[in-house]
Image (cartoon, coloured by chain):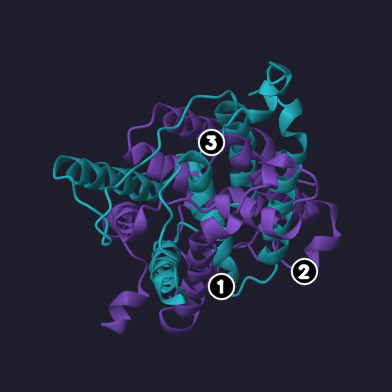
Amino acid sequence: MIEFLKQPWAWYVAGPLIGLMVPALLLLGNKMLGVSSSLRHVCAACVPAKIPFFHYDWKKEAWNLFFVAGIVAGGAIVAVFLDNPNPIAINPQLVTELNQYGLSEPHSLMPEELFNWQQLFTAKGLFFIVFGGLLVGFGTRYAGGCTSGHSIMGLSNLQLPSLIATISFMVGGFIMANLILPYILNW
Amino acid sequence: MPTTNKKKHSVNTDFEVRSLDIAEPKISKESFLSYAKYLLMGIIFGIVLVKSEVISWYRIQEMFRLQSFHMYGVMGSAVVTGIISIWLIKKFNINTIYGKPVVIPAKKFSKGQIYGGLIFGFGWALTGACPGPLYALIGSGFSIIIITLLSALAGTWLYGYFKERLPH
Protein backbone atom coordinates (compact mmCIF):
# COMPACT_ATOMS: atom_id res chain seq x y z
CA MET A 1 0.00 0.00 0.00
CA ILE A 2 2.70 2.46 1.05
CA GLU A 3 4.73 1.49 -2.02
CA PHE A 4 1.70 2.24 -4.18
CA LEU A 5 1.16 5.63 -2.52
CA LYS A 6 4.81 6.53 -3.05
CA GLN A 7 4.36 6.60 -6.82
CA PRO A 8 3.28 9.88 -8.40
CA TRP A 9 -0.52 10.15 -8.32
CA ALA A 10 -2.36 10.27 -11.65
CA TRP A 11 -4.31 13.38 -12.59
CA TYR A 12 -7.63 11.54 -12.34
CA VAL A 13 -6.85 10.69 -8.72
CA ALA A 14 -5.37 14.01 -7.64
CA GLY A 15 -7.79 16.29 -9.50
CA PRO A 16 -11.01 14.99 -7.91
CA LEU A 17 -9.32 14.96 -4.47
CA ILE A 18 -8.40 18.63 -4.93
CA GLY A 19 -11.92 19.35 -6.16
CA LEU A 20 -13.40 17.72 -3.05
CA MET A 21 -11.64 20.38 -0.94
CA VAL A 22 -14.33 22.79 -2.17
CA PRO A 23 -17.38 21.05 -0.64
CA ALA A 24 -15.34 19.84 2.35
CA LEU A 25 -14.43 23.39 3.41
CA LEU A 26 -17.93 24.70 2.67
CA LEU A 27 -19.58 22.01 4.75
CA LEU A 28 -17.07 22.19 7.58
CA GLY A 29 -17.85 25.83 8.23
CA ASN A 30 -18.72 27.88 5.14
CA LYS A 31 -15.08 28.36 4.16
CA MET A 32 -13.98 29.02 0.62
CA LEU A 33 -10.89 27.31 -0.72
CA GLY A 34 -8.18 29.92 -1.27
CA VAL A 35 -4.51 30.04 -0.37
CA SER A 36 -3.23 33.45 -1.46
CA SER A 37 -5.54 35.22 1.00
CA SER A 38 -3.32 33.81 3.77
CA LEU A 39 -0.62 36.24 2.59
CA ARG A 40 -2.98 39.16 3.14
CA HIS A 41 -3.88 37.87 6.60
CA VAL A 42 -0.20 37.63 7.55
CA CYS A 43 0.34 41.22 6.36
CA ALA A 44 -2.73 42.31 8.33
CA ALA A 45 -1.47 40.53 11.42
CA CYS A 46 2.20 41.52 11.24
CA VAL A 47 2.77 44.65 9.13
CA PRO A 48 -0.55 46.44 8.56
CA ALA A 49 1.22 49.86 8.70
CA LYS A 50 -1.43 52.48 7.93
CA ILE A 51 -2.72 50.68 4.86
CA PRO A 52 -6.54 50.37 4.87
CA PHE A 53 -6.30 47.13 2.85
CA PHE A 54 -4.72 45.44 5.88
CA HIS A 55 -7.05 46.85 8.50
CA TYR A 56 -9.63 44.19 9.20
CA ASP A 57 -10.13 41.55 11.84
CA TRP A 58 -7.75 38.92 10.48
CA LYS A 59 -8.52 36.69 13.47
CA LYS A 60 -11.91 36.02 11.91
CA GLU A 61 -10.00 34.45 9.01
CA ALA A 62 -7.64 32.47 11.22
CA TRP A 63 -8.93 29.18 9.80
CA ASN A 64 -7.03 30.03 6.61
CA LEU A 65 -3.73 30.18 8.49
CA PHE A 66 -4.42 26.74 9.98
CA PHE A 67 -5.17 25.51 6.48
CA VAL A 68 -1.85 26.71 5.04
CA ALA A 69 0.02 25.38 8.08
CA GLY A 70 -1.57 22.07 7.17
CA ILE A 71 -0.23 22.35 3.62
CA VAL A 72 3.31 22.74 4.98
CA ALA A 73 2.74 19.72 7.24
CA GLY A 74 1.33 17.74 4.31
CA GLY A 75 4.48 18.47 2.32
CA ALA A 76 6.60 17.27 5.23
CA ILE A 77 4.55 14.09 5.63
CA VAL A 78 5.16 13.21 1.99
CA ALA A 79 8.88 13.96 2.32
CA VAL A 80 9.17 11.61 5.31
CA PHE A 81 6.74 8.79 4.51
CA LEU A 82 5.63 8.92 0.87
CA ASP A 83 8.61 10.27 -1.04
CA ASN A 84 8.89 9.02 -4.61
CA PRO A 85 12.32 7.34 -4.83
CA ASN A 86 12.51 7.88 -8.62
CA PRO A 87 13.30 11.16 -10.36
CA ILE A 88 10.33 13.04 -11.80
CA ALA A 89 9.52 11.86 -15.33
CA ILE A 90 9.11 14.85 -17.63
CA ASN A 91 8.67 15.29 -21.35
CA PRO A 92 12.05 14.59 -23.09
CA GLN A 93 11.53 17.71 -25.23
CA LEU A 94 11.63 19.80 -22.07
CA VAL A 95 14.78 18.00 -20.89
CA THR A 96 16.44 18.81 -24.23
CA GLU A 97 15.38 22.45 -24.04
CA LEU A 98 16.57 22.82 -20.46
CA ASN A 99 19.89 21.19 -21.38
CA GLN A 100 20.47 24.04 -23.82
CA TYR A 101 20.29 26.45 -20.90
CA GLY A 102 22.73 24.36 -18.93
CA LEU A 103 20.15 22.76 -16.66
CA SER A 104 20.74 19.05 -16.09
CA GLU A 105 18.13 16.32 -16.02
CA PRO A 106 15.67 16.63 -13.14
CA HIS A 107 16.22 14.55 -10.03
CA SER A 108 13.72 16.25 -7.73
CA LEU A 109 10.61 18.42 -8.10
CA MET A 110 12.60 21.66 -8.47
CA PRO A 111 15.68 22.45 -10.56
CA GLU A 112 18.08 22.75 -7.66
CA GLU A 113 20.62 24.50 -9.88
CA LEU A 114 18.24 27.47 -10.00
CA PHE A 115 16.63 27.30 -6.59
CA ASN A 116 19.32 27.07 -3.92
CA TRP A 117 20.84 29.35 -1.30
CA GLN A 118 23.99 30.08 -3.35
CA GLN A 119 21.95 31.13 -6.36
CA LEU A 120 20.13 33.65 -4.19
CA PHE A 121 23.21 35.87 -4.42
CA THR A 122 23.31 35.87 -8.22
CA ALA A 123 21.22 38.01 -10.57
CA LYS A 124 19.55 34.95 -12.07
CA GLY A 125 18.75 33.47 -8.68
CA LEU A 126 17.34 36.75 -7.42
CA PHE A 127 15.13 36.95 -10.47
CA PHE A 128 13.63 33.48 -10.02
CA ILE A 129 13.53 33.27 -6.24
CA VAL A 130 12.75 36.85 -5.17
CA PHE A 131 11.30 38.70 -8.17
CA GLY A 132 9.17 35.66 -9.08
CA GLY A 133 7.81 35.56 -5.54
CA LEU A 134 7.03 39.29 -5.61
CA LEU A 135 5.04 38.83 -8.81
CA VAL A 136 3.12 35.90 -7.30
CA GLY A 137 2.16 37.87 -4.19
CA PHE A 138 1.38 41.13 -5.97
CA GLY A 139 -0.48 39.51 -8.87
CA THR A 140 -2.64 37.13 -6.84
CA ARG A 141 -3.89 39.88 -4.55
CA TYR A 142 -4.40 42.29 -7.45
CA ALA A 143 -6.44 39.55 -9.15
CA GLY A 144 -8.27 38.73 -5.91
CA GLY A 145 -7.14 35.12 -5.78
CA CYS A 146 -4.83 32.46 -7.11
CA THR A 147 -5.14 29.07 -8.73
CA SER A 148 -7.07 27.70 -5.77
CA GLY A 149 -9.32 30.70 -5.04
CA HIS A 150 -10.13 31.56 -8.63
CA SER A 151 -9.33 28.57 -10.83
CA ILE A 152 -10.76 25.93 -8.51
CA MET A 153 -13.15 27.59 -6.04
CA GLY A 154 -14.34 30.37 -8.36
CA LEU A 155 -14.75 28.19 -11.42
CA SER A 156 -16.53 25.54 -9.34
CA ASN A 157 -19.06 28.23 -8.43
CA LEU A 158 -19.28 29.30 -12.10
CA GLN A 159 -17.99 32.82 -11.42
CA LEU A 160 -17.18 34.72 -14.60
CA PRO A 161 -14.55 36.93 -12.86
CA SER A 162 -12.70 33.73 -11.92
CA LEU A 163 -12.73 32.56 -15.53
CA ILE A 164 -11.31 35.92 -16.62
CA ALA A 165 -8.63 35.64 -13.92
CA THR A 166 -7.79 32.04 -14.87
CA ILE A 167 -7.41 32.92 -18.55
CA SER A 168 -5.15 35.82 -17.52
CA PHE A 169 -3.01 33.50 -15.35
CA MET A 170 -2.56 31.17 -18.32
CA VAL A 171 -1.79 33.96 -20.81
CA GLY A 172 0.79 35.43 -18.41
CA GLY A 173 2.35 32.01 -17.90
CA PHE A 174 2.53 31.23 -21.62
CA ILE A 175 4.19 34.59 -22.32
CA MET A 176 6.74 34.18 -19.54
CA ALA A 177 7.56 30.51 -20.19
CA ASN A 178 7.90 30.76 -23.96
CA LEU A 179 8.97 34.30 -24.76
CA ILE A 180 10.88 35.60 -21.75
CA LEU A 181 12.19 32.62 -19.77
CA PRO A 182 14.55 31.39 -22.54
CA TYR A 183 16.44 34.71 -22.40
CA ILE A 184 16.67 34.72 -18.63
CA LEU A 185 17.85 31.11 -18.51
CA ASN A 186 20.57 31.94 -21.03
CA TRP A 187 22.07 34.65 -18.78
CA MET B 1 -22.79 64.18 1.77
CA PRO B 2 -19.10 64.29 2.59
CA THR B 3 -18.94 60.56 1.84
CA THR B 4 -18.66 61.08 -1.94
CA ASN B 5 -14.93 61.83 -2.07
CA LYS B 6 -14.19 58.73 -0.03
CA LYS B 7 -15.93 56.47 -2.49
CA LYS B 8 -12.83 55.33 -4.32
CA HIS B 9 -11.31 53.95 -1.13
CA SER B 10 -14.12 51.55 -0.42
CA VAL B 11 -14.08 49.64 -3.70
CA ASN B 12 -13.89 45.96 -2.90
CA THR B 13 -12.04 43.85 -5.46
CA ASP B 14 -10.92 41.01 -3.22
CA PHE B 15 -13.58 38.51 -2.27
CA GLU B 16 -11.45 36.18 -0.24
CA VAL B 17 -11.91 37.82 3.15
CA ARG B 18 -15.27 36.48 4.09
CA SER B 19 -15.77 38.63 7.17
CA LEU B 20 -15.58 41.71 4.91
CA ASP B 21 -18.11 40.34 2.41
CA ILE B 22 -20.75 38.79 4.60
CA ALA B 23 -22.14 40.08 7.85
CA GLU B 24 -22.64 36.69 9.42
CA PRO B 25 -24.36 36.32 12.75
CA LYS B 26 -21.67 35.99 15.35
CA ILE B 27 -20.08 32.63 14.89
CA SER B 28 -19.90 30.74 18.13
CA LYS B 29 -16.37 31.10 19.43
CA GLU B 30 -14.13 28.75 17.53
CA SER B 31 -11.99 26.56 19.71
CA PHE B 32 -8.60 25.20 18.80
CA LEU B 33 -10.28 21.88 18.16
CA SER B 34 -12.60 23.43 15.59
CA TYR B 35 -9.57 24.92 13.83
CA ALA B 36 -7.93 21.50 13.83
CA LYS B 37 -10.27 20.36 11.08
CA TYR B 38 -8.89 23.05 8.77
CA LEU B 39 -5.38 21.97 9.67
CA LEU B 40 -6.35 18.42 8.69
CA MET B 41 -7.86 19.62 5.38
CA GLY B 42 -4.63 21.52 4.71
CA ILE B 43 -2.60 18.38 5.38
CA ILE B 44 -4.67 16.39 2.88
CA PHE B 45 -4.46 19.22 0.33
CA GLY B 46 -0.69 19.45 0.82
CA ILE B 47 -0.18 15.71 0.39
CA VAL B 48 -2.20 15.71 -2.85
CA LEU B 49 -0.33 18.75 -4.20
CA VAL B 50 3.01 17.05 -3.68
CA LYS B 51 2.06 13.54 -4.79
CA SER B 52 0.44 14.81 -7.99
CA GLU B 53 3.65 16.79 -8.65
CA VAL B 54 1.68 19.97 -9.41
CA ILE B 55 4.15 21.77 -7.14
CA SER B 56 6.95 20.90 -9.56
CA TRP B 57 8.60 23.69 -11.57
CA TYR B 58 9.03 21.13 -14.37
CA ARG B 59 5.31 20.30 -14.50
CA ILE B 60 4.50 24.02 -14.77
CA GLN B 61 7.00 24.44 -17.61
CA GLU B 62 5.45 21.45 -19.41
CA MET B 63 1.99 22.93 -18.97
CA PHE B 64 2.95 26.30 -20.46
CA ARG B 65 4.67 24.55 -23.39
CA LEU B 66 1.72 22.18 -23.98
CA GLN B 67 4.09 19.26 -23.50
CA SER B 68 1.94 17.33 -21.05
CA PHE B 69 -1.71 16.83 -20.26
CA HIS B 70 -1.09 16.22 -16.57
CA MET B 71 -1.71 19.75 -15.19
CA TYR B 72 -4.75 20.25 -17.40
CA GLY B 73 -6.11 16.91 -16.25
CA VAL B 74 -5.61 17.78 -12.57
CA MET B 75 -7.13 21.25 -12.83
CA GLY B 76 -9.94 20.17 -15.16
CA SER B 77 -11.06 17.21 -13.06
CA ALA B 78 -10.76 19.31 -9.89
CA VAL B 79 -13.07 21.95 -11.37
CA VAL B 80 -15.58 19.37 -12.63
CA THR B 81 -15.63 17.77 -9.16
CA GLY B 82 -16.09 21.21 -7.59
CA ILE B 83 -18.90 22.20 -9.97
CA ILE B 84 -20.81 18.97 -9.29
CA SER B 85 -20.27 19.34 -5.53
CA ILE B 86 -21.57 22.91 -5.37
CA TRP B 87 -24.47 22.00 -7.63
CA LEU B 88 -25.40 19.15 -5.27
CA ILE B 89 -25.06 21.39 -2.20
CA LYS B 90 -27.38 23.96 -3.76
CA LYS B 91 -29.84 21.45 -5.18
CA PHE B 92 -30.34 19.59 -1.93
CA ASN B 93 -29.82 22.62 0.34
CA ILE B 94 -27.13 20.78 2.23
CA ASN B 95 -26.16 22.62 5.41
CA THR B 96 -22.80 22.88 7.10
CA ILE B 97 -22.02 20.48 9.93
CA TYR B 98 -23.25 23.25 12.25
CA GLY B 99 -26.62 23.30 10.51
CA LYS B 100 -26.03 26.65 8.79
CA PRO B 101 -26.90 27.16 5.13
CA VAL B 102 -23.93 27.27 2.76
CA VAL B 103 -23.42 30.84 1.52
CA ILE B 104 -20.90 31.69 -1.20
CA PRO B 105 -20.48 35.40 -1.93
CA ALA B 106 -20.50 36.32 -5.63
CA LYS B 107 -17.37 37.87 -7.12
CA LYS B 108 -17.50 41.06 -9.16
CA PHE B 109 -15.50 41.82 -12.25
CA SER B 110 -12.59 44.21 -11.92
CA LYS B 111 -9.73 44.92 -14.31
CA GLY B 112 -7.46 43.68 -11.56
CA GLN B 113 -8.41 40.15 -12.53
CA ILE B 114 -6.76 40.78 -15.90
CA TYR B 115 -3.74 42.90 -14.86
CA GLY B 116 -3.16 41.01 -11.63
CA GLY B 117 -3.83 37.73 -13.39
CA LEU B 118 -1.15 38.42 -15.99
CA ILE B 119 1.34 39.48 -13.31
CA PHE B 120 0.65 36.32 -11.32
CA GLY B 121 0.98 34.28 -14.53
CA PHE B 122 4.50 35.70 -15.03
CA GLY B 123 5.41 34.81 -11.47
CA TRP B 124 3.87 31.35 -11.75
CA ALA B 125 6.01 30.47 -14.78
CA LEU B 126 9.15 31.86 -13.10
CA THR B 127 8.85 30.26 -9.68
CA GLY B 128 6.93 27.25 -10.94
CA ALA B 129 4.63 27.67 -7.97
CA CYS B 130 1.42 29.35 -6.99
CA PRO B 131 0.81 30.11 -3.30
CA GLY B 132 -0.42 26.62 -2.29
CA PRO B 133 2.64 24.91 -3.75
CA LEU B 134 4.94 27.48 -2.08
CA TYR B 135 3.77 26.19 1.30
CA ALA B 136 3.94 22.56 0.17
CA LEU B 137 7.47 22.99 -1.22
CA ILE B 138 8.68 24.45 2.07
CA GLY B 139 7.19 21.46 3.88
CA SER B 140 8.88 19.12 1.39
CA GLY B 141 12.25 20.49 2.43
CA PHE B 142 13.02 23.10 -0.24
CA SER B 143 14.15 25.66 2.33
CA ILE B 144 15.07 28.29 -0.27
CA ILE B 145 11.35 28.64 -1.07
CA ILE B 146 10.98 30.36 2.30
CA ILE B 147 12.58 33.34 0.54
CA THR B 148 10.07 33.07 -2.31
CA LEU B 149 7.20 32.96 0.20
CA LEU B 150 8.58 36.01 2.02
CA SER B 151 8.85 37.75 -1.37
CA ALA B 152 5.24 36.86 -2.08
CA LEU B 153 4.30 38.38 1.27
CA ALA B 154 6.21 41.52 0.30
CA GLY B 155 4.40 41.53 -3.06
CA THR B 156 1.04 41.28 -1.30
CA TRP B 157 2.03 44.15 1.01
CA LEU B 158 3.15 46.27 -1.96
CA TYR B 159 -0.19 45.65 -3.64
CA GLY B 160 -1.98 46.86 -0.51
CA TYR B 161 0.26 49.93 -0.44
CA PHE B 162 -0.36 50.87 -4.09
CA LYS B 163 -3.93 49.58 -4.36
CA GLU B 164 -5.66 52.97 -4.63
CA ARG B 165 -3.32 54.08 -7.41
CA LEU B 166 -3.79 50.98 -9.55
CA PRO B 167 -6.46 50.57 -12.23
CA HIS B 168 -9.26 48.25 -11.11
Residue B4 x %, y %: 69, 17
Residue type (three-letter) at the residue carrying disc 1: Gly
- Labelled pair 1, 2 in contact (Cβ < 8 Å): no
Residue A121 x %, y %: 86, 61
- The quarter of the rendered structure image containing the N terminus of chain A is bottom left
* Residue at 45% in and 48% down: A148
Where does label 2 land, which residue? A117
Does residue B167 show up? no
What's the chain of the residue with tag 2? A
Q: Nearer the viewer, residue B42 or A103?
A: B42
- The chain displayed cyan equals B
Residue A178 in which image quadrant: top right
Residue B9 x %, y %: 69, 28
* Residue at 74% in and 43% down: A184
Residue B67 in which image quadrant: top left
Q: Chain A colour?
A: purple
Residue type (three-letter) at the residue carrying disc 3: Phe
Please report whichever mark, 2 or 3, sits nearer to the chain's N-terminal start: 2
* Residue at 47% in and 75% down: B32
**What is the CA distance from the residue labelled 1 to the residue labelled 2?**
17 Å
Counting other residues with Cα less than 10 Å from the Cα at mark 2, is it few (<14), some (14-19), or many (20 or more)? some
Where does label 3 land, which residue? A169
